[in-house]
Image (spheres, grey):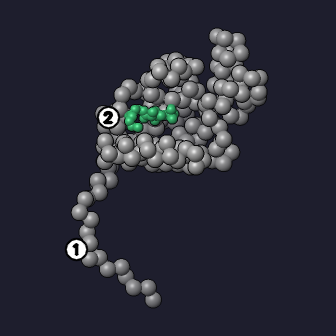
Amino acid sequence: MAQPLRYNRRERPTIPLPSTPHRVIAVYPGSFDPITNGHLDLIDRGARLCDRLIVAILRNEEKEPLFTIEERIDMLREVVRGYPTVEVDSFNGLLVQYAQEKGASVILRGIRAISDYEYELQMALMNRRLSPAIETVFLMAREEYSFISSRLVKQVIGLGGNIAGLVPPSVEVRLRSRVLDGQ
Ligand code: PNS
């Protein structure tokens, strides 16, 4: 018969873990230029793990985005309309500072392939150093979405390829008019 685990007082961790908050608020940060079905799947699964999920778009003009912040907010709000606990916002500056201001204890990120790992690890460790109480939680992308990126979607539509099923239909319409009709 298996022996019960014995708990040795002296083995207690010296750094106590933060207590579990009553309401878990998570921030899902990103560029979302534009939102893809991979992002949407992460929102769908992430929303089940927390009480409130804030999808936060980084205001970073250096990246020369295809869509303005306001357009990206509109697109995101449209596709998360059916999720009562999901909201869309934007932020400037340090992510952990923004998360603290929102009372969030979790940063949510997705990993598609091993190539994402290094970048994500670096950010997660930096964020932990800046704010140890905030945990980064990773969800693995679903297989069928693991090759999708906003960058590739923009490239494919620009070259006349079919992007149906890669982004929500409303986003496909916006991409078409922006990339193909220049509007
Ligand atoms: O979708 P992306 O472009 O991969 O998202 C990157 C993002 C927004 C998560 C990252 O650039 C970010 O958190 N920027 C905020 C600046 C910051 O906090 N930097 C220090 C920790 S890495």
Q: Residues within 10 Å of mark 2 (few under 14, many from 20)?
A: some
Q: Is residue 19 left or right of residue 85?
A: left
Residue sitting at x 66%, y 21%: 175
In the displayed structure, 63 sits above or below 99; it is: above
Q: Residue at x 50, y 46 (%)?
A: 118
| Residue 12: % across, % down | 25, 69
Mark 1 lies on residue? 10
- Return the residue nearer the eye: 159 or 101: 159
Look at the picture and state if 158 lies above or below 128: above
Q: In this view of the protein, which residue sits in the foreground, 84 or 116?
A: 116
The response on whether ligand 1 sits within 8 Å of label 2 is: yes
Please name the amino acid that badge 2 sits on: Gln
Check residue 97 in the rendering and tell me which mark sits there, or answer none. 2
Q: Is residue 92 left or right of residue 141?
A: left
- Mark earlier in primary sequence (2, 1): 1
Residue 147, image quadrant: top right
Q: Position of residue 107 (x, y in %)?
A: 42, 42
Q: Position of residue 115 (x, y in %)?
A: 58, 45
Residue at position x 29%, y 76% from top?
7
Would you identify the image quadrant in which residue 92 lies?
top left
Q: Residue flagged by tag 1: what amino acid is it?
A: Arg
At 32% from the left edge and 80% from the top edge, which residue is drawn? 6
Res 87 visible: no
**How many angstroms separate mark 2 from mark 1 (CA)?**
35 Å
* Secondary structure of the residue carrying numbered label 1: helix
Q: Give the number of the disc on residue 113.
A: none
